[in-house]
Image: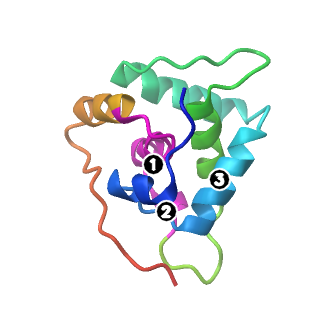
Amino acid sequence: MSSPPKYQQYRKLGGIINENDYDSALLRAKSATTLDIALIRQSEIIARVAGIELYNTEDDLDPITALYGILRADIRPEKVRHHHSQMCDQRLFAEALRMLGNVDALNKLIRAHPHISFVHEQRDVK
């Protein structure tokens, strides 16, 4: 897989996570070696429904799984009104795909869930 797109490319793909959280999540996901098994299974279910292949092994996490798990495990800071932890699992999985620049998988996810809007209202985070 190619290196993640720069933040501006991520935003062009419809990403809404602020740049600091974006950088932090990518850095944490890169060094993630384990996640809660429930987060791994949830990512596998989302991927399977959309026809996306993940390559999780006992010793290594697929970058999509690692990033989704990092984002899902984040807790909304007390003074932040809008945070990615408030998204449904599929929308958060889409953010991980955008962050990794995986447009093919993002399109599969969107097609698999026509009832979910993956277009976010852009908001300033305060």
Q: Quadrant of residue 113?
A: top left
Q: How is the image coloured?
A: rainbow
Secondary structure at numbered mark 2: loop
Of residues 77 and 25, the one nearer the viewer is 25
- Magenta stretch, overall SS: helix
Q: Find the magenta span and give its range.
A: 83-103
Count of numbered tags: 3
| Position in image of residue 73 (x %, y %) | 66, 51
Mark 1 or mark 3: name the one nearer the start of the chain: 3
Residue drawn where x is 39% and y is 59% of the image:
11
Mark 1 or mark 2: name the one nearer the start of the chain: 2
Contact, mark 2 vs mark 3 (Cβ under 8 Å): yes
Q: Disc 1 versus disc 3: distance between alpha carbons? A: 11 Å
Q: Quadrant of residue 122?
A: bottom left
Q: Disc 2 versus disc 3: distance between alpha carbons? A: 10 Å
**Residue 74 visible in image:** no
Q: Residue furthest left?
A: 114
Q: Given the image, on which type of amino acid does mark 3 rest?
A: Ala
The residue pinned by badge 2 equals 17
Of residues 22 and 68, the one nearer the viewer is 22
